[in-house]
């Protein structure tokens, strides 16, 4: 070959004036939940649309000019284009923003998260946390909340996965061209890009601010890949969940502290600050620093920051919380904590959690917030237990950790076929009735044969997609055509009458992807029935550093390669949002069998349920609340202290029994029209019961009611009159902590063991308050009818009244009580500190029991 130099040139089309607003549509992730918009782009060039991964912005840079000019003369295309623009403009009507979702006109929510998953065209997410954050933003847009989000713009997002013939996960990273992403730089008035500086060790790191539009909501993203930074610093925002501990702490400093600085630079003044998982907790330190620089003392600044900060944890095991060793924190924050006028010990105490000397980001998030929540009822209890030492004298069930069960953004994950059917039978207003339980009962009015037709159509679409991926997978792994035919035997889009089970999620060991393989002989009996075949579809990624997770993939691949399972058990590579949308809509049964109680919430089953798939899951996470006995099947988890292999055997047995005795017979109990009426009945009930309760609209509205509005109100109260409220509560807490070791209770009345109904009891307590005042404390009696097991939340509470001071200096308190129930009852007496400015009555974690 002759020596030669290759030159490249990129030719971008000119968007015709008639179609100019295609660029606007391509730069607002509204398209991620408006399928009509995505379909509009694909009609211009279906092959290019596939090639660019359904990315509208990249598509418009590559589509042929001739296709655009042809579209300007296509009446049908123009009519669709105008209709979409009308819908888009109505959604973005500025007057609708006056609603504010129940918040005041002065409010502003700032939502921090390490990853955001809106659509495959913006690859800055890895899994459930990111998708949840994306759905939170979408619902905030739907509710017209005054809401901004803050994250990092990764040059190299999460990896693309392939699986070789031996079941080994192969990892490929793609470098994103930001010009192809639905993001734009934030510009100063002079047209230059807006940047901030964040101190890291003895240097300043520059971060550029980008923005992405999600309907009404703006997401601001920080990027350090800039010429003015060193190669090391340019790499900080390169990888999502990549690199070592140094990269992780620097990413979290850029996100948390840099995020606060970015909002200042943008002129945005949040009244509510929401930390979604502990990665962003350093924002607490930056906000405290700002107030200290304004002249506030550290303790008052902490109270002022914490009172309007909301913290959501998604982790169900202690080891899952981010932490950094003492030496690393000293290295990065030595000068910083000195600027707060506090000691090293006081600074490290902000991140102290028992059992480890490390600086724990969850502990920082809790110490720097006053409202904290898990993401399901079960997870709220798990989180309260994990964090119990942060409130040392309070029982976990009473400590301040609450919960808001996750929800999904229905317009994103509900298949278009269901939307069309709902328009026809429920009316177009269903989009505004997301949480109306009575309204969704109308699904029962949809004729069974039409309901089943939609289900089969969605399964056919899934099968087309699976065939395409398996074909590509087989070719790359040099499989034969004959082998491919065996693999695709049951994946027949023309005749999708095979019971199809799906399991797709991150391959982590606690999710037990291989629980179905505990007894392969039993599994063979279930799925190899010629008259009632069963198809199992697996998909998911394991973190590149998670060797046990990758072993799960190899095990599934191994079992799938057994001759008797070929074609009946498929492992599909390249799990992404697009495949996820098809799977949750197309399978008949959605499997989930985690180790209880390690599934914080889980949302894939919600996505499946709203599409008419039926859940078969361990009663963990959201399914512990969602299961009603008629909308799916449940595996009751064994005791938490049960030995692991025994637990797996017991729960796999329950899984086999449910499949064999209930799922398979119900599905194949065909009526005259060729489908099972009982199956349709359960699928309908699944949709009716889950859709109004597990949608993101309900979730975000619950955050507004339970957390955002109270946080905003308390934040304003603490800040008014030169932070008088914050100073007051900080001084009061210091006084309480100093005195509490000397607080004691003594009972003056003689305990009475038996009375008659309607007789009154007169309780008298002498309290040594150690220089505290009666108004600083609450003494209360808790009483409950005695059973074998009682929880404090089941007790009735009665407060004692202050009646005077004894010569000894003890304060006297009395309570007259007439028990309302007969039978043996149990009661306790306790004292804890009280102040009307507290967000939670037990937030100090101090209590003395008599």
Image (tube, rainbow, N blue to C red):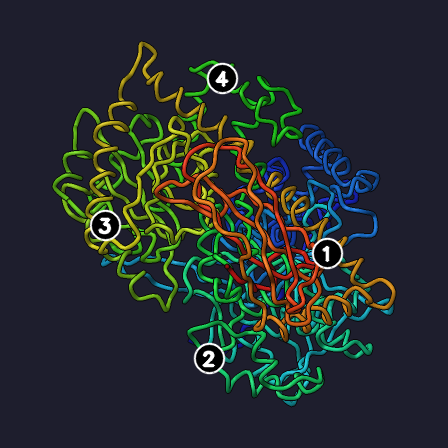
Q: Is residue 733 above or below residue 483?
A: below
Horizontal and vertical percent position of residue 83: 72, 31
| Mark nearer the N terminus (1 vs 2) | 2
Residue at 68% over, 64% down: 306
Residue at 60% over, 31% down: 435
Indicate which label's residue lies in the foreground, 2 or 3: 2
| Mark nearer the N terminus (3 vs 4) | 4
Q: Give the class, few, some or many, for how many residues have Cα within 10 Å of label 4's Cα (few <14, many ≥20).
A: some
| Mark nearer the N terminus (2 vs 3) | 2
| C-alpha distance separating marks 1 and 4 | 49 Å
Horizontal and vertical percent position of residue 564: 14, 41
Mark 4 lies on a secondary structure that is: helix
Q: Residue placed farthest to the top in the image?
A: 672
Label of residue 556 in the image: none
Q: Which residue is mark 3?
A: 647
Residue 44 visible in the current orientation: no
Query: Is 9 situated left or right of 325 in this image?
Result: right
| Mark nearer the N terminus (1 vs 4) | 4
| C-alpha distance separating marks 3 and 1 | 47 Å
Label of residue 836 in the image: 1
Indicate which label's residue lies in the foreground, 3 or 4: 3
Mark 1 lies on a secondary structure that is: loop
Q: Answer with the quarter of the image where residue 11 lies.
A: bottom right
Label of residue 357 in the image: 2
Q: Nearer the viewer, residue 617 or 747?
A: 747
Label of residue 444 in the image: 4
Q: Answer with the quarter of the image where residue 299 lies.
A: bottom right
Q: Give the class, few, some or many, for how many residues have Cα within 10 Å of label 1's Cα (few <14, many ≥20).
A: few
| Mark nearer the N terminus (3 vs 1) | 3
Q: Nearer the viewer, residue 822 or 479?
A: 822
Residue at 67% over, 49% down: 214
């Amino acid at each position: 070959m002759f020596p030669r130099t290759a030159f490249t040139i990129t030719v971008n089309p000119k968007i015709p004036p008639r179609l100019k607003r295609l660029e606007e549509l391509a730069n607002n992730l509204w398209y991620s939940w408006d399928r009509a918009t995505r379909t509009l782009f694909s009609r211009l060039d279906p092959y290019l649309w596939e090639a660019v991964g359904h990315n509208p912005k990249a598509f418009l840079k590559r589509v042929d000019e001739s296709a655009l000019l042809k579209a300007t003369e296509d009446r049908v295309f123009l009519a669709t284009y105008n209709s979409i623009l009308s819908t888009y403009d109505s959604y973005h009507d500025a007057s609708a923003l006056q609603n504010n979702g129940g918040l005041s006109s002065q409010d502003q929510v700032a939502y921090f998260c390490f990853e955001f998953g809106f659509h495959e065209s913006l690859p800055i997410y890895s899994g459930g946390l990111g998708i949840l954050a994306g759905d939170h933003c979408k619902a905030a847009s739907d509710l017209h909340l005054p809401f901004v989000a803050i994250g990092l713009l990764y040059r190299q997002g999460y990896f693309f996965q392939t699986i070789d013939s031996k079941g080994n996960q192969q990892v490929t990273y793609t470098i994103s061209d930001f010009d192809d992403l639905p993001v734009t730089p934030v510009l100063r008035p002079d047209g230059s890009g807006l940047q901030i500086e964040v101190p890291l060790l003895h240097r300043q790191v520059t971060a550029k601010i980008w923005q992405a539009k999600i309907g009404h909501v703006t997401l601001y993203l920080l990027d350090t890949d800039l010429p003015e930074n060193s190669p090391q610093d340019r790499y900080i925002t390169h990888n999502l969940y990549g690199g070592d501990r140094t990269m992780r702490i620097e990413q979290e400093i850029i996100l948390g502290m840099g995020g606060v600085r970015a909002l200042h630079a943008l002129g945005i003044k949040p009244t509510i600050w929401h930390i979604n998982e502990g990665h962003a907790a350093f924002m607490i330190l930056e906000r405290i620093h700002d107030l200290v620089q304004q002249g506030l003392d550290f303790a008052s600044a902490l109270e002022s920051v914490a009172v309007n900060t909301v913290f959501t944890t998604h982790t169900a095991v202690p080891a899952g919380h981010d932490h950094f060793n003492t030496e690393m924190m000293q290295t990065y924050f030595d000068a910083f904590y000195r600027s707060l006028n506090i000691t090293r010990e006081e600074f490290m105490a902000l991140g102290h959690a028992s059992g480890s000397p490390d600086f724990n980001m969850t502990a920082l998030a809790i110490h720097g917030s006053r409202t904290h929540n898990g993401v399901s009822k079960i997870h709220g209890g798990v989180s309260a237990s994990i964090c119990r030492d942060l409130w040392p004298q309070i029982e976990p069930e009473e400590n301040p950790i609450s919960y808001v069960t996750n929800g999904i953004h229905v317009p994103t994950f509900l298949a278009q076929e269901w939307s069309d059917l709902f328009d026809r039978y429920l009316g177009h207003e269903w989009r505004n009735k997301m949480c109306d339980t009575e309204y969704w009962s109308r699904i029962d009015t949809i004729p069974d044969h039409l309901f089943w037709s939609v289900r089969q159509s969605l399964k056919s679409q899934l099968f087309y997609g699976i065939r395409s991926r398996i074909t590509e997978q087989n070719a790359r792994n040099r499989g034969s055509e004959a082998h491919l035919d065996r693999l695709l035997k049951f994946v027949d889009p023309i005749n999708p009458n095979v019971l199809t089970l799906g399991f797709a999620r991150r391959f982590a060991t606690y999710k037990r992807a291989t629980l179905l393989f505990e007894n392969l002989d039993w599994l063979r009996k279930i799925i190899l029935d010629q008259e009632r075949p069963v198809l199992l579809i697996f998909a998911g990624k394991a973190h590149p550093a998670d060797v046990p997770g990758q072993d799960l993939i190899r095990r599934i691949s191994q079992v799938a390669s057994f001759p008797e399972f070929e074609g009946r058990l498929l492992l599909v590579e390249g799990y992404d949002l697009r495949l996820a949308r098809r799977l949750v809509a197309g399978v008949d049964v959605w499997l989930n069998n985690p180790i209880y109680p390690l599934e914080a919430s889980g949302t894939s089953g919600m996505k499946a349920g709203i599409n008419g798939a039926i859940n078969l899951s361990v009663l963990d996470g959201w399914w512990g609340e969602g299961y009603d006995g008629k909308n799916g099947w449940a595996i009751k988890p064994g005791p938490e202290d049960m030995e692991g292999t025994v637990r797996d055997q017991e729960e796999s047995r329950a899984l086999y029994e449910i499949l064999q005795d209930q799922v398979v017979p119900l599905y194949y109990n065909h009526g005259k029209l060729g489908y099972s009426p009982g199956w349709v009945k359960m699928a309908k009930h699944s949709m009716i019961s889950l859709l109004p309760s597990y949608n993101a609209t309900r979730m975000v509205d619950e955050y507004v009611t339970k957390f955002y509005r109270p946080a905003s109100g308390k934040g304003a109260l603490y800040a008014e009159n030169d932070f008088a409220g914050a100073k007051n509560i900080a001084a009061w807490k210091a006084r309480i902590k100093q005195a509490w070791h000397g607080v004691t209770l003594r009972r003056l009345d003689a305990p009475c063991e038996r009375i008659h109904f309607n007789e009154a009891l007169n309780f008298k307590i002498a309290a040594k308050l150690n220089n505290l005042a009666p108004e600083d404390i609450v003494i209360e009696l808790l009483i409950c009818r005695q059973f074998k097991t009682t929880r404090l939340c089941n007790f009735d509470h009665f407060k004692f009244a202050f009646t005077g001071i004894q010569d000894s200096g003890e304060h006297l308190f009395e309570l007259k009580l007439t028990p309302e129930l007969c039978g043996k009852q149990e009661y306790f007496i306790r004292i804890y500190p009280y102040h009307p400015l507290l967000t939670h009555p037990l937030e100090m974690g101090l209590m003395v029991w008599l």
